[in-house]
Amino acid sequence: MAITAPDNEKAGAAGRHPSAGHRGTALFRIYAIINKQFSSEALFVMLTFRKGLKDGIPIALGYISVSFAFGMLAVEKGLPLWSPILLSITNFTGTGQFAGIDLISANAGLPEVIFTLLVINIRYMLMSLSLSQKLVRTMPVWQRMVLAFGNTDEIFGVCIRQSEPLPMRYMMGIILCSYSGWNAGTVLGVLASSALPSMVRAALGITLYAMFIAIIVPPARDSKPIMKVILFSVLLSCLFAYVPLISSLGSGWRITICGVISAGLAAWLFPLDIKDSGDEQEAAG
Amino acid sequence: MSYTKILLVIFVMALCTYLPRMLPLALFRKQIRNRYISSLLCYLPYGILAAMVFPDIFGSTASLISGIAGTAVALILAYHKKGLLPVAVSACITVFITERILELTGML
């Protein structure tokens, strides 16, 4: 706004002096160019640290309930009080940590720990690969390595909703907010082993799943290929979960296989036009 | 398990979680120009998230019926493009109310 104000004065003066008028329009053009640049930058400015923190709030709320249950379960399984807290600080993952306390309480060997965790976490490779295409292109490797720590299912889910390239500050906001919720929930769960009545906990169990539905359904409404990916993946996933022989496969494999098959088929049947940015918008159109 | 072994297991777990997250992000810095791969990466989040939600969501609550009720409410609200928080909170409240009704009718 401050930039357009002197611009109007020049336009007013243009009527009296032809020479000044030329200068006026030239200046006007420069101002217009500057303004245009500002407004195209404004798209990036929207994804601020604060916006990241705000987008992290629903994740943090969901996390508190999940990690609360995690902290309680770990104590019930007889683990030392510090271990679930240390697990949450160093791992920052749901499924892996729940499996981890089972492994620790069962006195499992290291090879078993490694195998189980890799199977559960293989989906992160796909998510990170997908996220690598959404980040600001110029982001240095060390920043990518820092935010990789926070590429959880939920943060990834919220990030893919953004149509603009994701800057580091936005990623830090969303990660810090969610990470705080995850660790606060763990500590609370460890300290107050039964502070929340079980009927409230049962109701909170659906939080993160409902959030995922809110992430995937709106784009599916606008894009038939996305709708088909989702329906096919759900069908496959239910098949994997309920059909006797293949249901023995862990959830890590199930999610990875269903995701790759459904997206792979869709990429073959409904390939997208490549654009420099905003693949999501292309899919939604 | 001894404290040192628990520490070791936690450290190994952290590594097994961080590496799969970090390697693709650090290695794939350029935009992928291949049409098939970039389409795949665009569809992948939806395939993965869908498989993550179903059928697990039905078992995330105290009873299958409340799980289905919560899922239905989440689907309807999400279809009308409500935000993450309204959808999540509404699903929780639906589950809570359904479970209280089930309790009263002796089904839970």
Image (cartoon, rainbow, N blue to C red):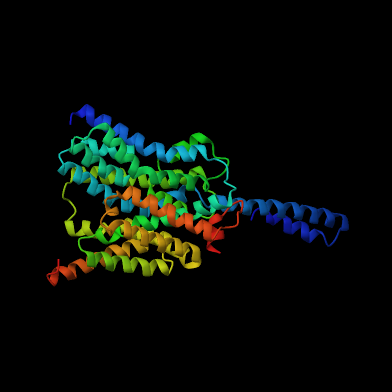
Asked if residue A99 is positioned above or below residue A142 in the image, the reply reads below
Near-viewer residue (A13 or A112): A112
Asked if residue A82 is positioned above or below residue A258 in the image, the reply reads above
**Residue displayed at 40% across by 36% down:** B19
Measured as percent of width and height from the top left, residue B21 is found at 42, 41
Which residue occupies the extreme left position in the image? B106
Measured as percent of width and height from the top left, residue B73 is found at 33, 68
Which residue occupies the extreme bottom position in the image? B105
**Residue displayed at 27% across by 67% down:** B68
**Residue displayed at 56% across by 64% down:** A285
Numbered label tally: 0
Measured as percent of width and height from the top left, residue A213 is found at 38, 61
Q: Residue A151: in sight, yes or no?
A: no
Side (left or right) of B106 relative to A234: left
Side (left or right) of B90 relative to A133: left
**Residue displayed at 47% across by 53% down:** A160
Side (left or right) of A132 relative to A200: right
Q: Residue A18: in sight, yes or no?
A: yes
Measured as percent of width and height from the top left, residue A108 is found at 21, 35
Near-viewer residue (B86 or A239): A239
Side (left or right) of A271 relative to A216: right
